[in-house]
Amino acid sequence: ARLLPAAAALVAAVPFVGSLLSPAVGAQDGGGRVEVEVSAGFDGQIGTSQVLPVTVTMTSERARHVDVELRVEGSARRYRTELVAGAPVELDVALSPPPFEVTSFRIEATVTGTGGGRLGDAATEVVPRKDLTVVGVGPSLARSSDTSIERTVGGVQRAVLVPLTAERWREPGVLAALSGVVLGPADLDELTGEHHEQLRSWVWQGGNLALDVPRTDDLPVVDLPAAEGARTAVGAGWVRFTDGAAAAGPWDRVLEPSVPTVTPDGFGDIWI
């Protein structure tokens, strides 16, 4: 969980498994309702990824520990986190959508005190969009710090561009929620060792990594020899060189339509 604004100190959130009862709001733990909001996707934009980022924002009248239950079509996950008096706190989690095709589904959040009293709840309706693909973009290529929507190659889909800021990298499951990532030279230089590992695993599982640099014989990030041409298959995914096309624009020269890729179950078979 994190305090808002983003510059405030982080507050730990750990998974919690237990029985969450639902008496009247504020009936236990000293009373006092918690205001709750739930949002899904990236600024509300959702494609068909098998991992869904969800944010629960909570504002409490006083400092306290609370339990948060998130329900998606009958399945539930529970977390324990700490709230502070009068300041919004965000709990960021990664959830799996229903394991069957639906036109929409509901995410419900219930906040209870550690003694079991219900303090607040909220819900949001999620509508997956097959005409959208979600692509992470390095800060050097992002036109702003906000998400934007651009056309893909041939206009097959629209792409939600998500700037991969330092804060975004820390959000649970962020890469698994993306079908593509586009990085410029400066973004490659800024990658940490942890980022390299995350991107390497993501590509092997089906991610489409576009590097806006000239072709080299060795593939950055995945540390493998490059195939002839601009594109190399790596596991179930791709690494491709776009040689400045992303920086020059327009985006529909670079952004490719998505295909179902990463699953929350981890790696499948890997063939080299």
Image (cartoon, grey):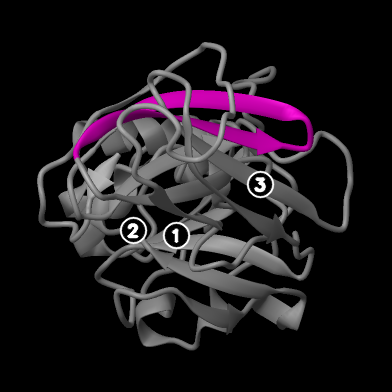
Circles 1 and 3: CB atoms closer than 8 Å: no
**Three-letter code, disc 3:** Ile
Whether residue 124 is situated above or below residue 73 in the rendered picture:
below
Q: Which residue is mark 2?
A: 164
- Amino acid type at circle 2 is Leu
Residue 83 picture quarter: top left
Relative to 160, is 93 above or below? Answer: above
Q: With 131 as the anchor, is 249 left or right in this view?
A: left
Q: Which residues are magenta?
A: 63-80
Quick check: 104 left or right of 234?
A: right
Judge left or right: residue 33 versus residue 135: left
Estimate the x, y position of residue 160 in percent, counting from the top left: 55, 71
- The residue identified by callout 1 is 136
Callout 2: few (<14), some (14-19), or many (20+) C-alpha neighbours within 10 Å?
many
Instruction: From the viewer's side, name the closer residue of 29 and 51.
Output: 29
Please say if 19 is above or below 39: above
Residue 69 drawn in magenta: yes
Q: Which one is closest to the eye, mark 3 or mark 2?
A: 3
Determine the residue positioned at 34% across, 27% down. Answer: 29
Name the residue carrying label 3: 107
**At label 1, which amino acid type do we have?**
Gly
- N-terminal of the pair, mark 1 or mark 2, is 1
Residue under the image location 20 percent in, 55 percent down: 87
Whether the magenta-drawn stretch holds residue 76 is answered as: yes
* Residue 159 in view of the camera: yes
x and y percentages locating residue 21 in the rendered image: 58, 22
Q: Which residue occupies 88% across, 50% down?
A: 102
Picture coordinates of residue 40 (x, y %)? 56, 55
Name the one closer to the observer, 221 or 42: 42
